[in-house]
Amino acid sequence: MAETTRSATKAAPARTTRRARGTKASGPAAAPAGGGAARTVNGTAPGVPADEPETLVGYYRQMLLIRRFEERAARAYTEAKIGGYCHLNLGEEATVVGLMTALRPTDYLFTNYREHGYALAKGISAERVMAELYGRSTGVSKGWGGSMHLFDAEARLLGGYGIVGGQVPLAAGAALAVSYKGGDEVVMCHMGDGTTAIGAFHESLNIAGLWDLPVVFVVINNGLGMGTTVEHSAAEPELYRRGAAYRMESVRVDGTDVVAVRDAARHAVERARAESKPYLLETTSPRLKGHSVVDPARYRSKEEKEALKAADPLARMALELEEAGILSHDERDRLDAEVTAEIDAAAAFADESPAPEVSTLFDYTYATPVPGELRRLPADPVFSS
Ligand SMILES: Cc1ncc(C[n+]2csc(CCOP(=O)(O)OP(=O)(O)O)c2C)c(N)n1
């Protein structure tokens, strides 16, 4: 059973082909144990159908695509094809796919700088995301944003933010806009565990709770803010409990279990949509590598690094699908070859794309040609029906 702050919270329905496990904390740098109910092969909730095998293979494929994308991004960075900062979703693939599956295409998304996987799972092509990392004009932010600032109004991905917590008040503001206009869209806002100690996090949850805004805040708890553990930075390390201070329903779920994340996220999103109530969802998953691609993570002991291998959500799902007779080793290899070819094509596309024209440097800096100029903002259509 997932842990919640309200007794009224329903446990996420059981619909998977396997038994969920918590991520066991193995030391200060490990992610905390996940919530998540024990589940069986054909689902345990009466009347709830089990997931179709194709659905699960589809999730696995998306997770694999994110894994191969991130590995390729790390390689391209060492080849100096990518500049600036670059943070990867390695270890968070099940969380990413589970969360994004719960959203409608019309729902809005705000994330921090660790966002490549979310852009892919929100339906933006690997070519456009990779081209952005390479700083090319064909990129999702026309080459001017880079890894930390992916933005696509059409896909309703409203960034990609480098300032820790910067996205949280903006997400509350977007939810206020949705509410004001009477729309039924939901805003989802991701952040890391370290972000929950930032003032803007508390201000945003307070106003969202006070004004009943349709926003789902998601804390992606990977156990570390750069090299500092949650236990060393949070007076209440069970981060989902922070929702109680704002009378907000909240839950912690095992972020290495894609179905558990999806079900918890669906509950949160649909509640926000139907009742216009904010929600705080915490997912726990390992950060398999350093904070960014240039961080060798020397603060982790050998034992901690070893333990991370057992927590890898992709390896776990591969094994479980094989054991359940859903995806054989050979089929998995075929899928891997397919996905790797897609990523190779994306890297080639990025490599061949032109850099943006220098004359466009300031085109996307301010909403108006003159800062503060009073006129309809180009961003307005994003919130129109
Ligand atoms: C306001 C602010 N303070 C400090 C930093 C430097 N910084 C960048 S990432 C980071 C850690 C954030 O950790 P967390 O929120 O857990 O996210 P994660 O990197 O684990 O996804 C810090 C302190 C920053 N970018 N912005």
Image (tube, rainbow, N blue to C red):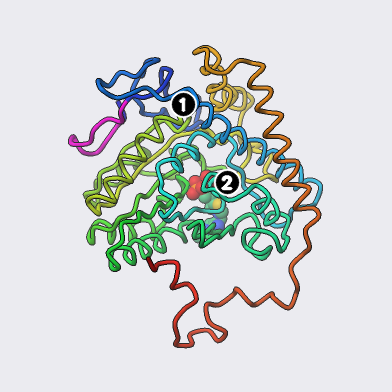
**Stretch in magenta:** 3-13
Q: Nearer the viewer, residue 343 or 22?
A: 343
Q: Quadrant of the C terminus?
A: bottom left
> Which percent across, then down, holds residue 233?
44, 45
Q: Residue at x 42, y 63 (%)?
A: 170
Q: Position of residue 38 (x, y in %)?
A: 35, 19
Q: Is residue 25 magenta?
A: no
* Magenta-drawn stretch, dominant element (helix, strand or loop): loop
What's under tag 1, amino acid-wise? Ala
Q: Nearer the viewer, residue 356 or 210?
A: 356
Which residue occupies the foreground of this view, 67 or 203? 67
Q: Which residue is mark 2?
A: 120
Q: Quadrant of residue 141?
A: bottom right
Label 2 close to label 1 by CB (< 8 Å): no
Q: Residues within 10 Å of mark 2 (few under 14, many from 20)?
A: many
For marks 2 and 1, give the CA distance.
29 Å
Crowding at dot 1, Cα within 10 Å, few <14 / some 14-19 / many 20+, comes out as: some
Can you say which quadrant of the picture contains the N terminus? Answer: top left
The three-letter amino acid code for the residue at tag 2 is Leu
Relative image position of residue 196 (x, y in whole percent)? 40, 50
- Residue marked by disc 1: 25
